[in-house]
Image (tube, grey):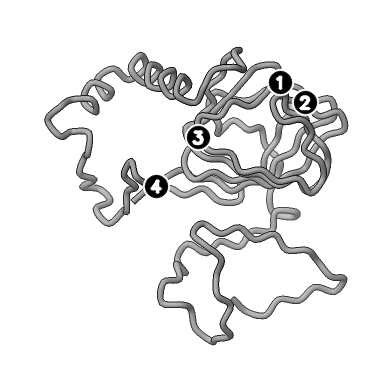
Amino acid sequence: MPALSVPRGAQGLLFYNSGEPSFVESDADHPLALRSQFVSVDAYHGLQWRAADFVKPSVAPGCMVKLLRSDPLTHAHSLLYCMTPNYWQDNISYHDCCEESYHIWGTSTMMQFGALPTGGYFWRPEWINHGAFASELGVLGFGRTHSQLHNYFHFNPWSSPAENRERAAAQLRRHKPNLSRWVRSPDGHNHPHDFEYPAFEYEDEDGG
């Protein structure tokens, strides 16, 4: 990265996927750097707020996003989001991806976890219930996921992660019965060969 400067100072927010980097002064990229995936976005001047309609099913009206980056293979997202004053959503949700968020400004409240104020941060693994939630004065935040974010909505705050996985699998079986049947077949189809993207590194059940 080139040298950075700002006339009145700034705070930087950095996220890492696999450990902290080692900062070494150099005039060339690290051999493992993914230069082709570098994205530079002026989110203040260059992007408009839009409804969070890329998430299915969509959240309650009043949550807007600026999508900063979307991985075309995994649908992992990095985004700015805002909640309008008096925003509320009365159901429970969970996802089959992990999710993390930092509140740049404002406070939101989630039933299970209480208030997340300005400067608050969370990292939430898959299948964990959250909600109902609300914000009295509104929120500006930064969030990201490691794969496509799908909202599984329900109204039981006491369901366990195991029960939530079962509900998600049952939904897949209802919505895509042929795919579900093929994935569950005993003849090895549950480890499909990706002929379209053969170099993509998949994670197995042990995270390897």
Q: Amino acid at mark 4?
A: Leu
Q: Is residue 74 left or right of residue 49?
A: left
Q: Earlier in the sequence, mark 1 or mark 3?
A: 1
Residue 66: in sight, yes or no?
no
Q: Earlier in the sequence, mark 3 or mark 4?
A: 4
Q: Position of residue 65 (x, y in %)?
A: 67, 39
How far apart are the alpha carbons under marks 2 and 4? 32 Å
Label 3: which secondary element:
loop
> On the rendered image, what quadrant is the N terminus found in?
bottom right
Residue 197 % position (x, y): 28, 51
* Residue found at the very far left of the displayed protein: 187
Tell me which corner region of the image, top left, top right, bottom left or bottom right, holds residue 77.
top right
The residue type indicated by label 2 comes to Ala
Front position among marks 3 and 4: 3
Marks 2 and 4 in Cβ contact (< 8 Å): no
Q: Evaluate if marks 2 and 1 touch, with contact meaning CB atoms under 8 Å apart.
A: yes
The label shown at residue 126 is 3
Question: Nearer the observer, disc 2 or disc 4?
Answer: 2
Which residue in the structure is indicated by mark 4?
Answer: 73
> Residue at position x 62%, y 17% from top?
157
Please tell me the numbered disc located at residue 89: 1
Q: Quadrant of residue 94 in the image?
A: top right
Q: Few, some or many C-alpha atoms within 10 Å of disc 1 (few <14, some 14-19, many ≥20)?
A: some
Q: Of the two numbered discs 2 and 4 on the same chain, state the one appearing first in sequence.
A: 4
Disc 2/disc 1 C-alpha distance (Å):
6 Å
Q: Position of residue 114 (x, y in %)?
A: 76, 30
The amino acid beneath tag 3 is Glu
Asked whether disc 3 touches disc 2, contact meaning CB atoms under 8 Å apart, the reply is no
Q: Quadrant of residue 67?
A: top right
Three-letter amino acid code of the residue under disc 1: Gln
